[in-house]
Image (tube, helix red, strand yellow):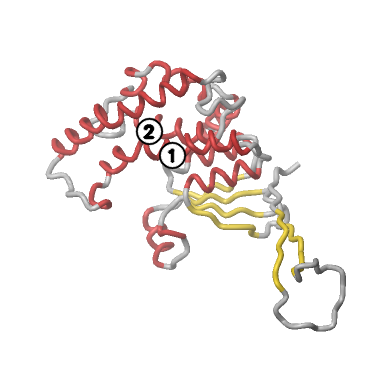
Amino acid sequence: QALSLELSWRRHYHDNDGDDGDDSDDSDDSGQRGETHTMAKIAACKLTYFPIKGKGEPIRLAANYSGLPLEDVRVSREEFQAMREAKEIPFNQLPVAEFFDDEGRSVCKVAQTRAILRTVARASGDRMYSSDLGQAAQVDQFLDFEEDLFAAMRSSIFPGRIGMDEYKDDAEKEARRAHVAETVFTTKLELLDRALSASQTGWVAGTGEPSIADFALTASLGWIDSGIVDGVPQGFVVSKFPRVGTYLEKFAALEENKAYYASKET
């Protein structure tokens, strides 16, 4: 059975068209009329991103974990530029996800990784989020902490995009990133390590199973620890924080994740 998200609300509005002589009982004593609207259920997602893990990977893994059917569209840089010029993508950035109902009709088109993750989670019946406001807030704070944790390192990848001078040479690039890793990044990792120490479940927000915050954090931690970032040695995180390494292993050991990557090898 397709997983779905049903959004409904009660809309009230004032009747400002004057008295039309209609005394029907859909108007309350204040002169407001109520109308209930039910939007289509989300049954599938189309993700557009580059052919890399990056910010698309937590979305791919979350959709796979929840069982939400995902069309994984991977575009080239040239295709991305064409999409920007045609004004097809919000904020001129990827990833972008379009969500569909069970009849294939578009429900919404969403940009920004966190917004997409929340929508995937809602479509799965809050399996990776929570219908409880307090628990959802805990998930949200760690989802936002992921941005805080990696902000300085991401800024070092494309300094010109945030108004900083580009690197004069590779030596300066590696030195600056090494400095960020040893100072700002390490200080933030200490906070993550503390949160994991306090968790009784091993998941960062203390949820019974991985939340969308875990999907976002583990993807980014895997990126930084892979050795792909010049100036940051492979295994930098796990060598300093073994508990974070255990966290990454726990996430990688999920049967859904193992099945996902096994399917990509065939």
Say which of 62 and 114 sits in front: 114
Say if mark 2 contacts mark 1, CB within 8 Å: yes
Give the residue drawn at x 64%, y 36%: 132
Give the residue drawn at x 71%, y 56%: 9
Return the residue at label 1: 53
Say above or below: 24 vs 220: below
Q: Amino acid at mark 2?
A: Trp
As drawn, the label of residue 181 is none
Residue 253 rendering spot, x and y as whole percentages:
54, 21
Say above or below: 182 vs 150: above
Residue 238 rendering spot, x and y as whole percentages:
36, 20
Say which of 227 and 244 sits in front: 244
Left or right: 17, with 47 as reference point: right
CA separation in Å, label 2 and label 1: 8 Å
Asked which quadrant contains residue 70, the reply is top right
Mark 2 and mark 1 lie on one chain; the one further toward the N terminus is 1
Say above or below: 172 vs 42: above
Return the residue at label 2: 223
Left or right: 99, with 36 as reference point: left
Say which of 41 and 47 sits in front: 41
Residue 196 rendering spot, x and y as whole percentages:
47, 21
Q: Amino acid at mark 1?
A: Lys
What crowding class fits label 1: few (fewer than 14 Cα within 10 Å), some (14-19), or many (20 or more)?
Answer: some
What crowding class fits label 2: few (fewer than 14 Cα within 10 Å), some (14-19), or many (20 or more)?
Answer: some
